[in-house]
Each structure stands twice: as C-alpha cells, then as structure tokens.
Image (cartoon, rainbow, N blue to C red):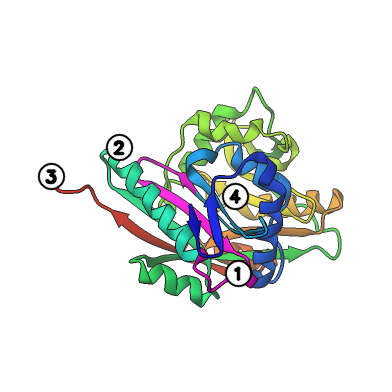
Amino acid sequence: MNHLGFRLRHPTLDDAQAVCDLVAVCDTEDLGAPDIVLDDVLNMWSGFDLDHNVWVAEDENDDLVGYAFLEEDSEEKLFSYGCVRPSARGRGVGAALVAVLEARALALRDESGKTKRLQGMIPSSCSDAAALFEGQGFAPIRYFKRMTLRLEAEPAAGVLPERFAIVPYVKGRDEQAVYEAYTEAFADHWDFAVPSIEKFIERTQLPTFEERWWLIAWDSEEDTVAGFALCRMSEDLLFIEHLGVRRCYRGRGLALALLQNVFASSYRAGQINVSLGVDAANPTGAYRLYEKAGMKPENEISIYEKTFLISAS
C-alpha cells in the first residue's frame, strides 16, 4: 500500500530488530527511555497473525518509519498499538496506520458478525496522537501509570503470615492452580477478558520464560495458590506483568510481601531496575500499594476506544 513518501506492508521475522529499534526511538522521544528489547518483539509476534494484524511503514530508503499491530483480545475487544519515528511525524504515517487498523477491525466485525471495540494505546503526553485518534472518532476511556523502582541496596524480603510461603512456579504442576488464581484475582479489574487456559499457558512456552520469575504465594493449609507475581526479566529491567491476590486472601499483606520478594530476587539476580503498569483507577488500591513499596510514577499511557457496531440489515 503506497502513500506519498512511504508505503505500508506486513512484516516478516527479518524485520523484528528494525521494529525493536524503531519502537525504542519512539519510546525515548515520548517516554524518556526505551521500553523494549528484541525478545519482547519476538514474544509478541509469536502469537500474532503477521500477514493480517501487523504493519510497518517504510520510506523511500526502505527504512522503517512506522509500526502498528492489532491483537484480538476477545470476541469483542481488539487492542492496538502504533508508533511513528519522530523525524517522520507530520507526513501522514500515523493516519495511514490508524486507517489500516480501522479497516482490519471492520473486516473482523464483518467476518464474525459481532460488534468490535478497537482500543489504541498512546503516551498521554503525545497531543498529536490524541488529536489523530479523536479526529477519527476515538475517545479516551482509561489511563495507566508506569511505575518504577531503582534498587540502590538489597531490600528485605517480604514478611508472610504463618502458613504461607512464596515459591517459584513449576511447569507441569502449577498451570491449573495459577490460572484459576489469575482469573479470580483479575475478575474485578477493568475490561478483563478471561483467557482460555491454553492461551494463558502459552506465555510459559516462550523461549524467554523463566519459572523463577513467576512467584506464587502458597497456602500450605489449603494447598492452593493464594496470590502470584508473574514477571519477566529482560536486559534492562524486571517487568512485573501481573500481581494479584485472590479475593478471600486479601487484607493479609500478601500483595506487599510478593512485591518485596520480587524486589529482593531481582536485586540478587543483578537487576536493580523494576517496573510495572497499573490502572490509575484500579479498585483494589494497587496504585497505593506500589507507592507504599517505594515505586514512583514515571509516565502515563492513555487508552482510546472506538466501537464498530454491526451494520443494520
């Protein structure tokens, strides 16, 4: 698909490093620092339909100037992300990427016969991206804070109530128990879509997955998972993807203990930078918990949404 000065195409795996480099440049411009490594791209792409749901924009020199993907989160919700190289902004690349995302959402709506909600994620500081979305009929619906902590000294491990222990996830043993704890703990979170257990377990099959970074708060009395911290280590930081406690175990300090054990484990592994994302309106008080643990907000992400209704016949 050709445009004035650039063209859109679907990527191949050979483009992964160039996409990683592009996103890192955009992150540095918009968020102050890169937030991606090559393994992140490869992990995401392993679950994407590259021929239909991922696009890159390249200029006359075949250099990548834009990137976008669409993820089919559920029957109704579609999640997307896009970025444009700072030096190429103002040339219509972002508008072209939003157009192909919308076209794909319409195609999926028509194929399935179901209404689709297309969400897009942008840094809250990017007024040009916000204006683009709003001009296309998207509206802001939620805000997420990126919180970070730099560990200057070895932190103390969290103190657990009696009968509880924090242990690493074990493949072949913990899949069902952790899945059930995850779906229960996040059931009251905004826009949560329950994944199939097969989809949930896919993350443990990635080459970069390490059991030691999925920590479980184990109730020895009930012989079950009470809470969890699901993390991934990269070269620049430890990222906490999900931290949750089942409803019946809340109020006992398990979430803080899990968080503190993550910090201690990360420091001992030689990684002093820890990060996570949190819904600013989270009803469980997660934002206050992370502040109590010493984490600080670094930047904010806005989620925009547009609904594609079933056409009247």
Q: In this view of the protein, which residue sits in the foreground, 155 or 47?
A: 47
- Mark identifier at residue 112: 2
Q: Is residue 14 visible?
A: yes
Front tag of 1 and 3: 1
Which residue is the site of mark 1? 88
CA gap, disc 1 to disc 3? 42 Å
Mark 4, residues whose alpha carbon is within 10 Å: few (<14), some, or many (≥20)? many
Between discs 3 and 2, the one toward the N terminus: 2
Rounded to the nearest angstrom, the CA distance separating label 3 from label 2 is 15 Å
**Label 4 element class:** strand
Sequence-first disc among 4 and 3: 4
Mark 4 and mark 2 in contact (Cβ < 8 Å)? no
What's the residue type where badge 2 is placed? Ser
Going from N to C along the chain, the mark reached first, 1 or 3, is 1
The residue carrying pointer 3 sits among few (fewer than 14), some (14 to 19) or many (20 or more) residues within 10 Å by Cα, namely few
Q: Which mark is residue 313?
A: 3
Residue annotated with mark 4:
243
The region drawn magenta spans 70-93
- Could you tell me how far apart the alpha carbons at marks 2 and 4 are, in whole angstroms? 33 Å
Residues at badges 1 and 2 in contact (C-beta under 8 Å)? no
